[in-house]
């Protein structure tokens, strides 16, 4: 059974890589090689030799260059684009990228209006539970797709909508709503896990949409020469974000991750080839930071899930990431990471309000 699950996970990874343009991945690898962080050994060297702050600076600059390139694509088609969609799997950096793209376009005199589709979740009581009692937030159907499409059409036609407010701590929509109107000279900005899912925005003509896909395209090898998995980077991000911002136990996040992966492969990966721009959301310096915050939780997850055949996926995943982090040199002082860093979306201390 363990081999079957491990093989399935490798197939997932291969499928994702197949949908990403090869040149995009090669550019990430070339950058890492040039900065000496294409291996865990090289990354550890940067932590130990005092040059880690420079790595943070250079990594952030590369990310910002890519955001600027995406903005320039939108500017080229500003006459017809009414909606920009930032899509990607969980914890890939969609929210921060949305904010930074907004900043860049404003410098060009373009007016941007963001809408957070997380507010369109159904009340928790309407969500189905699995055999473990877990709710599945990862499927598009967890969102009120009919209401989203009605609101999108209303917005591009100049009508005012009432955006719901969703409270993740209570699992309920609040009674209060927020009015939103899109003027003719404004572009709507959507940050959504399922932004590429056609049923999410089917009410809007294709030529009015610009689709950007973001993924943690990490190109770092561990001590055995294996590539660090993109999904493991995102799991670490989600663990710390869930624990700090959503009062959710990181061990439970590990146990829930199989839902995340299943939904990604069904509702995100097949549509990557239809996007207009692919952006790397991985940061070359984040693993030493994740070790500081999340490393102890993997031993707890292995203990909790290791003897339960129904949780074998979580046990395998926890063991793999624990082994990875055991090779990484921890960064005890993360003050060199600026408040504008994408990583601050997850570890806290961001300049931005989410």
Image (cartoon, helix red, strand yellow):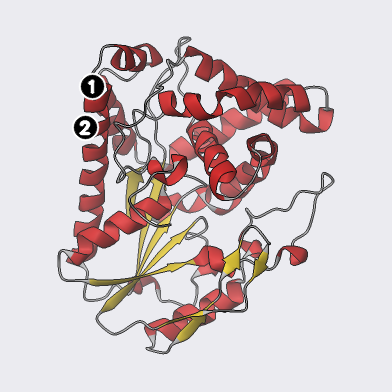
Relative depth, front residue between 152 and 43: 43
Q: Secondary structure at mark 2?
A: helix
In the rendered view, would you say 114 is above or below 354? below
Residue 337 in the figure: left or right of residue 79: right
Marks 2,1: beta carbons within 8 A: yes
**Structural crowding at the residue carrying mark 2, measured as other residues with C-alpha within 10 Å and reported as few (<14), some (14–19) or many (≥20):** some
Residue 311 in the figure: left or right of residue 145: right
Q: Residue at x 51, y 29 (%)?
A: 293
* Residue 73 appears in the rendering: no
For the image shown, how many numbered marks are present on the structure?
2
In the rendered view, would you say 270 is above or below 237? below
Which residue lies under the disc numbered 2? 58
Q: Residue at x 69, y 39 (%)?
A: 252
Which residue lies under the disc numbered 1? 35
Q: Residue 269 location in percent, x, y?
A: 51, 47
Name which quarter of the figure residue 137 lies in: bottom right
């Amino acid at each position: 059974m363990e081999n079957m699950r491990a093989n399935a996970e490798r197939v997932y990874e291969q499928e994702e890589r197949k949908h990403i343009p090869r040149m995009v991945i090669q550019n990430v690898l070339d950058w890492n090689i040039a900065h000496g962080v294409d291996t865990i050994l090289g990354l550890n060297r940067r932590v130990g030799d005092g040059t880690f702050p420079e790595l943070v600076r250079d990594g952030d600059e590369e990310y910002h260059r890519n955001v600027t390139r995406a903005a320039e694509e939108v500017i080229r088609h500003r006459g017809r684009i009414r909606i920009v969609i930032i899509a990607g799997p969980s914890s890939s950096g969609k929210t921060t990228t949305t904010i930074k793209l907004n900043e860049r376009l404003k410098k060009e005199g373009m007016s941007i209006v963001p809408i957070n589709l997380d507010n369109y979740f159904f009340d928790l009581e309407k969500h189905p539970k699995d055999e473990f009692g877990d709710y599945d937030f990862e499927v598009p159907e967890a969102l009120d797709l009919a209401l989203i499409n009605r609101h999108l059409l209303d917005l591009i036609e100049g009508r005012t909508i009432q955006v719901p407010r969703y409270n993740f701590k209570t699992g309920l929509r609040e009674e209060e709503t927020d009015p939103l109107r899109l003027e003719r000279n404004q572009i709507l900005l959507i940050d959504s896990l399922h932004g590429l899912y056609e049923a999410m925005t089917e009410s809007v003509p294709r030529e009015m949409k610009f689709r950007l896909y973001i993924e943690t395209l990490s190109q770092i090898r561990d001590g055995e020469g294996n590539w660090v998995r993109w999904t493991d980077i995102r799991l670490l991000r989600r663990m710390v974000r869930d624990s700090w911002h959503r009062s959710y136990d990181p061990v439970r996040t590990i146990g829930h991750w199989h839902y995340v992966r299943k939904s990604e492969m069904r509702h995100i990966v097949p549509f990557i080839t239809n996007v207009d721009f692919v952006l790397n959301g991985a940061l070359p310096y984040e693993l030493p930071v994740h070790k500081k915050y999340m490393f102890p939780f993997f031993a707890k997850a292995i203990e909790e899930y290791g003897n339960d055949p129904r949780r074998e996926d979580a046990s395998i995943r926890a063991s793999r990431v624990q082994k990875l982090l055991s090779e990484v040199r921890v960064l005890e002082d993360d003050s060199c990471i600026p408040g504008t860093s994408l990583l601050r979306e997850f570890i806290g201390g961001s300049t931005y309000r989410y």
